[in-house]
Amino acid sequence: MNILNQLAEYLFIKRKDKSRPKSKWIGYMHGMNRITVLVFIICLILLAIKLLR
């Protein structure tokens, strides 16, 4: 369940937990993870479109 919460935070569906420590390196890591999740979703959509054609 923790993975789903983290994914929701990456995609700005859920608010971030205020009690977590903040670090610029953690921010960079979350930014890169957010980009990779969005690219993965876009690729899945493109593959689904290609398969349905």
Image: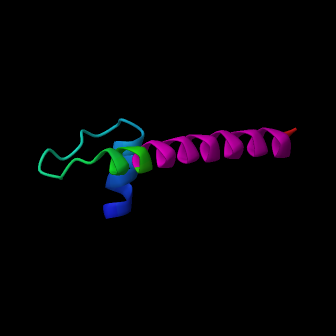
Q: Is residue 19 above or below residue 45?
A: below
Magenta segment's dominant SS is helix
* Residue 1 shows up from this direction: no
Closer-to-camera residue (19/6):
19
Q: Residue at x 57, y 47 (%)?
A: 36
| Rendering coords of residue 16 (x, y %) | 24, 43
Q: Quadrant of the C terminus?
A: top right
Residue 17 vs residue 32: left or right?
left
**Residue 20 spot, x, y in % from top left:** 17, 52
Q: Quadrant of the N terminus?
A: bottom left
User: Which quadrant of the figure has residue 10?
Assistant: top left
Q: Residue at x 11, y 50 (%)?
A: 19
**Residue, x 27% and y 48% (percent of image)?**
23
Tell me if residue 11 can be seen: yes
Is-magenta flag for residue 32?
yes
Residue lying furthest right: 53
Q: Which residues are magenta?
A: 30-52
What is the residue that sits farthest to the left in this orientation?
19
Residue 32, compared with residue 13, is above or below; it is below
Residue 44 at x, y = what percent? 68, 46
Q: Which residue is farthest bottom?
A: 1
| 39 displayed left or right of 52 | left
Q: Front-most of 42 and 17?
A: 17
Against 2, is 33 above or below? above
Q: How is the image coloured?
A: rainbow
Please state the total of marks drawn on the protein image: 0
Identified at 70% across, 43% down, the residue is: 43
**Percent position of residue 40, x then y:** 63, 47
